[in-house]
Image (tube, grey):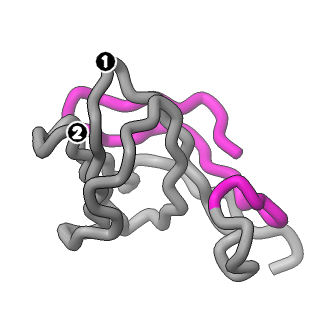
Amino acid sequence: MISNTAVLVDGSVTGTLKYVTGYTGFNQEKEEEQEGYFFPFMLGGSGTTMTFKKNGMVSKEAIPWEKTNVFRVTQEDTFTVLVDDNEIVTFNFKKAKFEEVEGA
């Protein structure tokens, strides 16, 4: 899924994201969301609720807090994570390498 990744202080993700197919851990019901580039991450601390913003727009709001999470990403995406309405981090993937899809 990923290799040699790091998150810099400004939220930039570095390293390599590998194209994955058949990954049901992101969405078991939507087959079209079971392939792509996935970015797993763990949150420190704790909280009650989380809100995710993709490219500035709320994509999930006030969902139960979880330590381990996964985003399906492209190189142009930004993802902001809020815990209990406090912004924790905004990830961006401009510095990451996205492996080419095999057979493409």
Q: Looking at the picture, tell me which residue is in the foreground, 34 or 61.
A: 61
User: Is the residue under label 2 in contact with that under label 1 (CB below 8 Å)?
Assistant: yes
Outermost residue, right side:
103
- Could you say where residue 37 lies in the image, as x and y percent from the top left? 62, 60
* Residue corresponding to mark 1: 45
Q: In which quarter of the image is residue 100?
A: bottom right
Image quarter of the N terminus: top right
Q: Looking at the picture, tell me which residue is in the foreground, 80 or 67.
A: 67
Question: Is residue 66 shown left or right of residue 26?
Answer: left
Q: Which element type, helix, strand or loop, lies under badge 2?
A: strand
- Could you say where residue 32 lies in the image, as x and y percent from the top left? 69, 81
- Could you say where residue 89 lies in the image, as x and y percent from the top left? 23, 39
The first of marks 1 and 2 along the sequence is 1
Residue 19 in the magenta stretch? The answer is: yes
| Dot 1 amino acid type | Gly
Count the numbered circles shown: 2
Distance from Cα at disc 1 to Cα at disc 2: 10 Å
| Dot 2 amino acid type | Val
Mark 1 surroundings: few (<14), some (14-19) or many (≥20) residues within 10 A:
few
Question: Is residue 75 shown left or right of residue 26?
Answer: left
Checking the image for residue 83, the label placed there is: 2
Q: Looking at the picture, tell me which residue is in the foreground, 51 or 39.
A: 51
At x 75%, y 79%, the residue is 31
13 up-or-down from 42: above or below = below
Residues rendered magenta in the picture: 1-26
At x 34%, y 64%, the residue is 60
